[in-house]
Image (cartoon, rainbow, N blue to C red):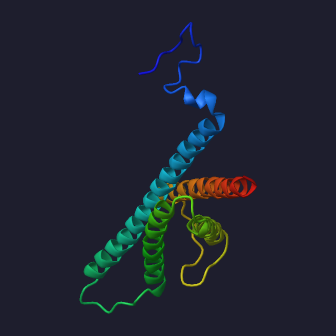
Amino acid sequence: MGKIFSIVNPFSFFENDRYLLYPILFMQLMKSKAMKSAIISMAVLMLATGTLYLFVSSQEIADASQEFAENAGQPQEFDSGAFIETAFFAGVGAAYIPIGLWATITRHTSKVPYILAIGGSVALIGLYILSRNADIPFVGQQDDVGFIDILSKVLQGGIIAVSAYIIMSIRREKKASLLA
C-alpha cells in the first residue's frame, strides 16, 4: 500500500514515482484502464442482452408448447407470427453473444464489432418503437410494455454508449500514433 503523504515527496501517494517523471506514461496507463473497463463493460452488456433475448425466446417456446398440450387432440392452427417472433428473439440472442466475445477478443484493434453492436442495438430499439406504434406484418401492433422490454432497451442503450466510447478511443489512439 502506498503512502498517503510524505514531507520529502508530497507526491508519494503514487506507488511508482516514474509516472511523475513521465506524464505521458501515466496518461497511457489511465487510458488503458478506462479502455479495459469499457471493453469489460461491453462484454457484460452484450452477454446480458444476448442471455435476455434467449430467455425470452425460451419463454415463447414454453408458452407455445403449453398451449399445444392444452389443445391436444383438437385441430390446431399454426401461428406463424409467434414462430417468427420466437425465431427472431433466438437469433438476436444468438448474435449478441458472439459479437460481444469478438469485441472482447479484438479489444481495441478493430472497430467492426462495436459498429455492428451499435447498428444492431439501434435497429432493435427502432423496431421496438415501431412495433408499439404501427401494425407490423406477422406480429401486429404490440401494446404491452414490460420489465423485460425496458431492461433490454436499457442494456442496448448501454451497448450503444460504451461502443461509441470505444470507437472514439480507438480513433484517438490511431490519430495519436500517426502524429507520433
Q: Residue at x 65, y 71 (%)?
A: 130
Foreground of the two, 11 or 81: 11
Residue 54 point in image, percent of width and height: 40, 68
Foreground of the two, 83 or 77: 83
Foreground of the two, 119 or 100: 100
Q: How many marks?
A: 0
Q: Quadrant of residue 1?
A: top left
Residue 111 point in image, percent of width and height: 61, 65
The answer to whether 14 appears left or right of 68 in the picture is right
* Residue 83 shows in the view: yes
Residue most extreme to the bottom: 75
Residue 162 point in image, percent of width and height: 59, 53
Foreground of the two, 161 or 9: 9
* Residue 128 shows in the view: no
The answer to whether 120 appears left or right of 63 in the picture is right
Q: Is residue 161 above or below residue 122?
A: above
Residue most extreme to the right: 179
Q: Is residue 54 above or below residue 34?
A: below
Q: Quadrant of residue 113?
A: bottom right
Q: Residue at x 56, y 40 (%)?
A: 29
The answer to whether 7 appears left or right of 84 in the picture is right
Residue 163 point in image, percent of width and height: 60, 58
Q: Residue at x 44, y 69 (%)?
A: 98
Q: Is residue 106 above or below residue 13?
A: below
